[in-house]
Amino acid sequence: MPSTNGAHIGGVLEDMNSVMTRLDEAGAATATHVGDVAAGVQTLQAEVNDVTMTLTNTFVQLAENLRGQIARAHDTLVAADWSGQSRGAADAAEAQLNGDVNTTLEAANAGVEALGTALRNQVEGFYLEVTGQFTSVMTNIEGAYGDLSRGTRMFADNLAQADQTISFGG
C-alpha cells in the first residue's frame, strides 16, 4: 500500500465489520448494566423488609415467652394460700411486669420500624444517586461506542468507495 508521511491507510473490511459489531455490542451492554443496578436495589429493599420482619417476629416471640413466664408465676401466686400486704404487692408486680413487657415490645417494634424506614430511605437515596450518575456515565459510554462504530463504518465505506475510483477502460 502507498504511504503518506510514513502512515498506512487501509484495512480488511471483514475486520472492520467485526470491530463495529463489538463496539455496537459494548454500547448495548451499558443499558443492561443500568437495569442490573435497579434490580440489585430492588433485591436490597426486599432484604431490608426481611430483616425488619425477622426482628419484629423475634421481639414478638420474646415478649410471648416473657408473658408465659409471668402468667405461670401469677398462676402459682393465685394458687398459693397467702394473704396480706405482700400478696397484694406480688399481684401488683405481676401487673407491672405485663405492662413493662407491652411497653418494651411497643418500643422495640417502633425501633425496628424506624430502622427499616431509615434503611429503605438510605437504599432509595443510594439508588437515585447511583442510577443518576451511572446512567449518565453509561449513556456517555454508549454514545462513545456508537460514535466509534459509526466512525469505523464510515472509514470502511470510504475505503470501499476509494477502491472503486480507479478504473482502466483500455
Image: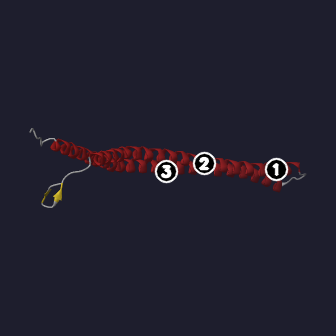
Mark 1 / mark 3, whichever is N-terminal: 1
Comparing 151 with 162, the one in front is 162
Q: Is residue 26 left or right of residue 88?
A: left
In the image, what residue occupies the spot 16% across and 41% down? 164
Q: Which residue is mark 1?
A: 72
Which of the two marks, 1 or 3, is nearer to us in this view? 3
Q: From the viewer's perspective, is the residue at label 2 or at label 3 nearer?
A: 3
* Quarter occupied by the N terminus: bottom left
Relative horizontal placement of residue 82, taking residue 110 as reference (left or right): right
Mark 2, secondary structure of its residue: helix
Residue lying furthest bottom: 6
| Residue found at x 68% / y 52% | 100
Q: Which mark is residue 146?
A: none
Residue on which the image places disc 2? 109
143 or 96: nearer the viewer: 143
Q: Give the residue type that dot 2 points to.
A: Asn
Residue 53 % position (x, y):
60, 46
Front-most of residues 154 and 62: 154
Which kind of residue does numbered mark 3 sit on?
Ala
As measured in the structure, the alpha-carbon distance from the residue carrying label 2 to the one carrying label 3 is 14 Å
Q: Quadrant of the C terminus?
A: top left
> How many numbered dots are placed on residues in this image?
3
Answer with the quarter of the image where residue 2 lies: bottom left
Q: Residues within 10 Å of mark 2 (few under 14, many from 20)?
A: some
Binning the other alpha carbons within 10 Å of mark 3 as few (below 14), some (14 to 19) or many (20 upward) gives few
Q: Which mark is residue 118?
A: 3
